[in-house]
Image: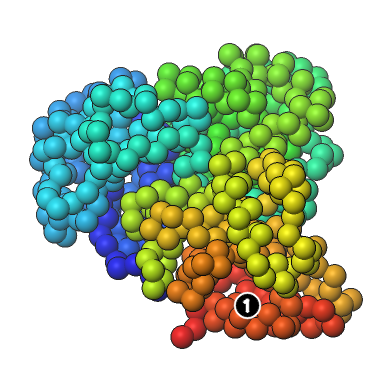
Amino acid sequence: MALPAKTIAIRADAGTIIGAGHVMRCLTLANVLRQCDHTVRFVCRAHAGHMQAVIQQQGFDCVMLPAPSIAVDSNHASWLGADWQTDAEETRAALTQYGAPDWLIIDHYGIDAEWETQVLATPSQLMVIDDLADRPHACDVLLDQTHGRATTDYAGLVPANTTVLTGSVYTLLRPDFLTQRVVAIQRGQHPNAAPPRLLLSLGAMDPTNVTSEMLSALAAHPWATDFSVTVVLSSKAPHLKAVQLQAAASPLNIAIKTDVADMAALLASMDIAIGAGGTSAWERACLGLPTVTLAIANNQQTLTHNLASAGLALAATSPADAVIQLKQLHDDPALRQSLITAGMLAVNGLGAWQITQHMGLAGQTSKAGIITLRPATPADKDTVYQWQTQPGQRQFARTPHPPTVDEHARWWANTMKNPNAYTLIAACTGQPVGMLRLDPPTLALPTDTMLPPDAMEVSILLDKNQQGQGMARAALTHLGEMFIGVPLVADIHPENTASVALFARCGYQPLSQRDDNRTYVRPAVCKPLVTA
């Protein structure tokens, strides 16, 4: 059973100076919240290049605050477009149109604890999305998805009881990135094409026109004409026309795409990229797109440095340097594969779900409490081993004998470094109760039986001490919510009647029958299929 519906308000801005990233990542979170049947509304200021139409096109109400009354420049303090007291008053008035929300989400470099204290109404709760760790906040939950960021970076900046979520495991990516990641896993990541496909993505607005500098730097090298170059910009980018004229006169093979509706599919079709060090860096990492990263704003310096230090991307200091590193990356298959693997391990595409679970807004109820799913960690090794070796636990498994301690340790170590599978821990009110896995299918099906394209095989292991409380069904249902765009299959022994009944109740239907096992499939759906 799903959790009770709540109302959520989001305060975020977009514009030619601010960029699109804050609103785009909030839309990601908003879509997951709506999938969980919560109501989400936006409050935005009418900056030049605002994104009210985009927000409304995705089906969300968007209350617009007046146009900026002060100049907006590269100084984050100016990004509110008004003094903080005025913005707080206008935001509070906008929120009263619908009544106090259950949660207020803030994603804005111009907002701090003074604003938050002024606006927040009891009993609302507050979540802040930040990247800077440079000002105080009065919030219940703080998210900083910067790779390498530590919770201690916010010591003294948030109340002691604030839940601080840091690191790339919480990266906010739309559900279609999860679907396209599975597509990439199934077909093999980014095979070299002829000509190689290069993505140039230096910010949707690119206010300083780094894109033109990058195209000029590429055109200076004859070998760059071997690439098929795709440039991505917003239709509201201030230098779009100049880039279009430059592309038309360039010796390079350049296509310009504006307002890309399916960015995940576009990224998945590319072989290599030069990209900005903002939120789009996480999208590329999730899909295993090897990238030369270029910081195009001061607030991107830390992320760009951290990406390079962790081996998730190469970092360039200028467009000319980016071209040199692009050549190195293209000519070194081992380096490309290293970036692919590291990126996919760092960003699994489940960040929005992890965040909503921490907010108490996602999960499924069982008789014993709320069931949530989180990525497994090395610390889960011994707990999973205890489950694996419980009497009768592996009776219907493909390998019925329990593993030895050493066998399990080797398997777990390989699992932790496998970017092509998902290993998730089911928890009941925070306590581990089971494990779910998604792997590329290895089923031996009859020749006349075909799996859905891009399917993943699901398996479930529940602590035998927790059976009979509806936990397995809740976990499997929640898995279906999280991977809603992915066909899921299960291979079940026909004598395992409990599993047959469990998967049937969660919408899985028979696909094939063999002497030893039966295969069940849950197609990609718009809502999880659960019957009474």
- The image shows a total of numbered marks equal to 1
Judge the density around disc 1: few (<14), some (14-19), many (≥20) Cα neighbours within 10 Å.
Answer: some
Q: Residue at x 38, y 64 (%)?
A: 370
Rendering coords of residue 173 (x, y %): 50, 47
Foreground residue, 357 or 28?
Answer: 357
Rendering coords of residue 48 (x, y %): 32, 36
Rendered position, 168 above or below 100? above
- Horizontal arrangement in the rendering, residue 463 relative to residue 90 (left or right): right
- Horizontal arrangement in the rendering, residue 343 relative to residue 141 (left or right): right
- In the orientation shown, which residue stands out farthest toward the bottom? 532
Choose top left, top right, bottom left or bottom right for residue 419.
top right
Q: Residue at x 46, y 31 (%)?
A: 146
**What amino acid type should be assigned to the residue bearing mark 1?**
Ser
- Horizontal arrangement in the rendering, residue 510 relative to residue 152 (left or right): right
Rendered position, 112 above or below 73? below
Rendered position, 279 above or below 219? below
Rendering coords of residue 407 (x, y %): 76, 48
Rendering coords of residue 510 (x, y %): 70, 83
Q: Residue at x 47, y 34 (%)?
A: 167
Identify the residue position indicated by label 1 in the image. 499
Can residue 338 be seen?
A: yes
Visual colour scheme: rainbow
SS at circle 1? helix
- In the orientation shown, which residue stands out farthest toward the right? 447
Can residue 504 be seen?
A: no
Foreground residue, 115 or 81?
Answer: 115
Choose top left, top right, bottom left or bottom right for residue 212.
top right
Choose top left, top right, bottom left or bottom right for residue 44.
top left
The N terminus - image quarter: bottom left
Q: Residue at x 63, y 73 (%)?
A: 523
- In the orientation shown, which residue stands out farthest toward the front? 391
